[in-house]
Every structure is written in C-alpha cells, then in structure tokens.
Amino acid sequence: ASEQGRDILIHMPMQPLNNQRIEAGGLKLGMSQEEVGQRVRSARNVVSNAIGLNNHMGSAATIDTDLMTSLMTELASQHLFFLDSRTIGHSIAGKVAEEYGVNALSRHIFLDDSDAYEDVHAQFQKALQHARKHGTAIVIGHPRNNTIAVLQNMLARLPADIQLVGVSSLWRDKKVIPPKPFILLFSDKPAPTSVAPFEDVPMLRGIPK
C-alpha cells in the first residue's frame, strides 16, 4: 500500500451495542487509559506507517465518554487522526477528538450495507450527489465481490468533476473536515486479522459545481 502511495489507517475493533464478538486487541468499555494506550500502541507497532485510526463496529464505544477520552489522549500523543465510521448516529468521538486536539473526520455514507450490486451502485451514486451538494462525502465500503465490481466499473469512468485524492489531504493542518472534497474510503484486500488491523484506502475528491 505504501509503495502504491496509499494512506494507511489502523482499523481498530471497538465494542458494539449488540453481542457481536470483538476481535483480540479491540477496545472495550471499562478499559483503563493504560489498557487503551497499550492496544493502540500495539496496533501502531504492527502498522508503523499508519497515519490515522478508525473504528470497526464501535456503536457502544463511540458513545462512551471515558473510552473516547482515553483513545483521543493516546491518538494525540501518537499524532494520529481519527476517522469515525459512525456506526451510531449520536457518536461523541468527533467532539472528544476536537477537545483533545485530534484531527477528526466522519463517514457520511456506507457503500454496502446491502451486498446487492444494484444497491451498492445506488449508494455510490448517492455519494456522488452528496459530494456535489455538500462538497464532501466520505464513503466506507468492504472487500466484497459486488462492492469491488461497482468500484471497478465506476472508478474507470469517473465524472469529470470527481478527482481521486488521499485521505491525508483532508486533515493535515485541519481539525475539522475542509469544505470541498469527495472521498471514497475502500480497501480491495481481504479484511485483516486482529493481529494486524489496518485499511489501505484509495480516495476520491469531488469539486462541487
């Protein structure tokens, strides 16, 4: 990924509201500051060229003040930014990140809640519309067959007002998302194990008319 010039993120498992299993190395409610820090540092040691971290699951974690405070304290010390997958609508992760001086971005659209090709394609079109209307659309997808097929098809014939960029262009020297980019966050590689949590992420930027 680095050789291809891609930005790399730590994809950190975090506790959800349901009973879904959290992979080893994930963040759970009730952890101490030291436990959270140790797990972030352990992931960073595996993915030493990561520039940021985002949450895998985490609907419970990202609404917990204590856990988010511990996480953002560690991210600040590691000079990592945070991308909130927003697996729950009232996430406080961005607010806590700002309080601790951590650059933060937030997902706008999930590309493949449904795995049907037509649904993924519709979500991609929705992302384009969102970008043109608001200037920014951060979209998260998964390495599934139909998702890959849609991306291969659509990325090969992007509209003239859509430009591929890296996620780092959105947060460097900014504590909030800048006004005019469009991003697609996606990895076409199989999901990593909990031993090596990461995502490599090609991006898109759209220039509103």
Image (cartoon, helix red, strand yellow):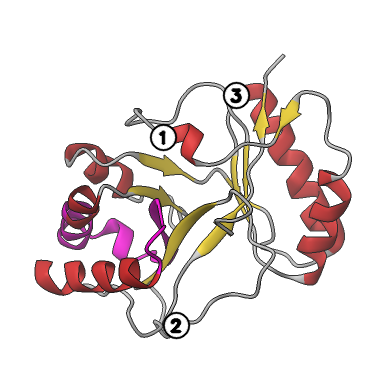
Q: Which residue is mark 2?
A: 20
State left or right for residue 200 relative to residue 90: right
Local crowd size for mark 2, using a 10 Å CA cut-off: few (<14), some (14–19), many (≥20) = few
Image location (x, y in percent) of residue 144: 73, 70
Magenta residues span: 47-73
Residue that sits furthest to the top in the current view? 209
Q: Quadrant of the C terminus?
A: top right
**Any mark on residue 171, and which?**
1
Residue 87 in view: no
Q: Which mark, by number, is residue 135? A: 3
200 lies above or below 131: below
Where is 195 relative to 172, above or below?
below
- In this view, the residue farthest toward the front is 3
Rendering coords of residue 62 (x, y %): 32, 58
Please report whichever mark, 3 or 1, sits nearer to the chain's N-terminal start: 3
What's the residue type where badge 2 is placed? Answer: Gln
Q: CA distance from mark 1 to mark 2?
A: 31 Å
Q: Residue at x 25, y 68 (%)?
A: 41
Q: Position of residue 60 (x, y in %)?
A: 33, 66
- The x, y position of residue 59, in whole percent, is 39, 64
Quarter of the image holding residue 71? Answer: bottom left
Task: Check disc 1 and report its element: helix, strand or loop.
Answer: helix
Of the residues shown, which amino acid type is indicated by label 1? Trp
Q: Is residue 199 magenta?
A: no
Of helix, strand and loop, which one carries label 2?
A: loop
Residue at 87%, 44% (x, y): give it: 156
**Residue at 77% from the left image edge and 23% from the top image edge:** 161
Asked if one can make out residue 171 in the rendered structure from this viewpoint, the answer is: yes
